Amino acid sequence: MGQLADRLRIAKRRGDPPIGFAARAADASKRRTLLIVVTGEQAQGGDALIVRADLADEAALRTLTSANELPVGIEPPQLTHAGAVTAEEAGIDFVVSGVGNATAAALTRPKLDYVLRVDGVPSEGELRALGSLRPLFIAVPPAETPISLRRAMDLRQVAMLSSTPLGAPVDAEIDAESLAALRDSGVAVVLLESPTAAEVAALAAQIAEIPARPRQHRGGDSPTLPSVSGGEGQGEADEDRAP
C-alpha cells in the first residue's frame, strides 16, 4: 500500500466522531478530513501531486519522485502494462486513468495504486466491478455548489455500490458546508487543478472547519459509506507523519 493510501486512511479516522477533550482540541492540521490532491507541476502544499505525463521515460519519472517528498501520481494518455511497470520501478505512488484508457493488465502491479475516472453514474454492475478492482479512489466529475440533493445521492450511489472512496474536483473557493456535503457523500479527496499555494492553504483551512461526522445511534439504519480498503489497523501510530 502506497503513501497516499496511508494518508487516506488517516484522514478517514480524523472524520470519525471525536472522543474526549483532547481529540476536540487537536490542531487544525490534524482535523482535516479530506485530502487535497493537486494536478499540475507542483503540489503547492497539497497532500499529493498528479502530473499528466507519458510513462515511457523512467529516468524522468525517477527525477519527479526524487524532487517531491509527497506522493506522486501520473496520469498518462494511455495506461498500458509496460507503462505501469515503468511507473512502479520509478517509485511512482499511483497512476490515474479513465476506464476506457487502460488495459486490464496495467492494473496488476502489486506496488502501484490506481485511481480510476468515471463519467456520470455507471450502472450498479459496473460500479461493483469497479470496486472489485480495488482502486485507491474513484475520480468523479465536478459538482456545482451548493451541492444539490440529487448530486449527493448520485455520489453516495457510486461510493456505496463500489465500496470505494471518491475524489471530486472542486474550486479553491468552495465553502466548508459544501465540503462537508461532499465528505458525507463518500468523497475522501478533493482535486485542485493547477492552484496557487495560497489557494491550497485557503482550501485546507476550510476543510479544517468541517465538523466530525455525528455519532449514529445504535441500531440506526443509516448506510455506511466506504472507508479506504486495506487494513484499518495499519499505520495508526503514524498519524503524525501526514500533514
Image (spheres, rainbow, N blue to C red):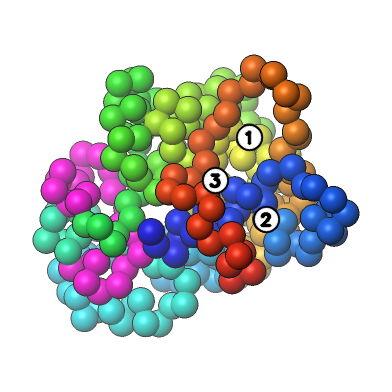
The location of residue 9, given as percent across then percent down, is 53, 53
Q: CA distance from mark 1 to mark 2?
A: 14 Å
The location of residue 141, given as percent across then percent down, is 44, 38
Q: Is residue 184 above or below residue 110?
A: above
Kind of element beneath mark 3: strand
Kind of element beneath mark 2: loop
Along the viewing direction, whichever of 83 and 214 lies nearer the viewer: 214
Along the viewing direction, whichever of 97 and 24 lies nearer the viewer: 24
The location of residue 188, given as percent across then percent down, is 54, 46
The location of residue 25, given as percent across then percent down, is 85, 59
Let me know if residue 96 is in the magenta part.
Answer: yes
Q: Which residue is pictured at 57% across the width and 29% down the height?
A: 224
Q: Residue furthest right?
A: 21
Q: CA distance from mark 3 to mark 2?
A: 11 Å
Q: Is residue 21 above or below residue 100?
A: below
Kind of residue sitting beneath label 2: Arg
Asked whether the viewer can see residue 95, the reply is yes
In the rendered structure, the answer to whether residue 175 lies left or right of residue 185 reads right
Kind of element beneath mark 1: helix
Along the viewing direction, whichever of 30 and 219 lies nearer the viewer: 219
Q: Which residues are magenta?
A: 86-108
Q: Which residue is mark 1?
A: 184
Q: Which residue is pictured at 33% across the width and 27% down the height?
A: 128
* Quadrant the C terminus occupies: bottom right
Q: Which residue is mark 3?
A: 188
Q: Which residue is mark 2?
A: 32
Kind of residue sitting beneath label 1: Asp
Asked whether the viewer can see residue 242, the reply is no
